[in-house]
Amino acid sequence: MSDEIVALARRWIGTPYVHQASVRGAGCDCLGLLIGIWRDAFGAIPEVPPNYSRDWAEPQGDERLWAAGQRHLIARPVSEAEAGSVLLFRMRDGAIAKHLGIEAKPGDSFIHAYSGHGVVESPLSLPWRRRIVARFAFPEEIA
């Protein structure tokens, strides 16, 4: 399943960054990329996210992405690099975790939708690795 997830994610490369969107080739943000991969792999998404601003739930301090990951994905140890893993990043110390990516080459690269760049495969450099706060796997199948 992990290689399939990476292949699905790579199909999104080049999609422009569009906040709250999830349409391959037309636009997506980091959550939209994850939603699109879920749709490609499993069909209907398990939960429709509410509208969200670019600051997410920062004023309230709610870890909404982390909680959604725990509801719908399988938690993995942060230290266990694996292709197809969903990576959750905290972009600043003390801020909520609000960026997502898919690990492409374990410990080496990840695919994400990045403002100003669209969907790209980026090196999983030390600054990025330091920001990972959670790692999840997609379920093998939907119950």
Image (cartoon, rainbow, N blue to C red):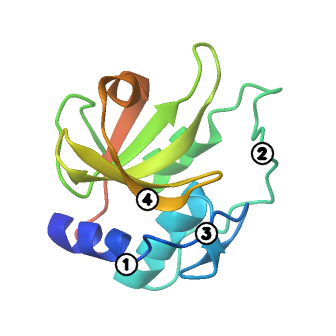
Q: Secondary structure at mark 2?
A: loop
Residue 85 placed where, x, y %? 28, 51
Whether residue 118 sits left or right of residue 88 in the image: it is: right
Disc nearest the viewer among 1 and 4: 4
Q: How many marks?
A: 4
Per the image, label 1 sits on a secondary structure element best described as: loop
Q: Image quadrant for the C terminus?
A: bottom left
Residue at (81%, 59%) from the top-left corner?
A: 51
Name the residue carrying label 1.
11
**Residue 95 is drawn in which quadrant?**
top right
From mark 1 to mark 4, how far is it between C-alphas? 10 Å
- Earlier sequence position, callout 1 versus callout 4: 1
Question: What type is the residue that disc 4 sits on?
Answer: Val
Q: Looking at the rendering, in which quadrant would you find the N terminus?
A: bottom left
Name the disc covering residue 120, or none.
Answer: 4
Q: Position of residue 97 (x, y in %)?
A: 57, 32
Sequence order check, earlier mark of 2 and 4: 2
**Spatial distance from mark 2 to mark 4, Cα to Cα?**
19 Å
Q: Nearer the viewer, mark 2 or mark 1?
A: 1
Mark number, residue 16:
3
Q: Which residue is mark 2?
A: 54
Quick check: 106 above or below 141? above
Answer whether residue 74 is visible to the viewer in this image: no
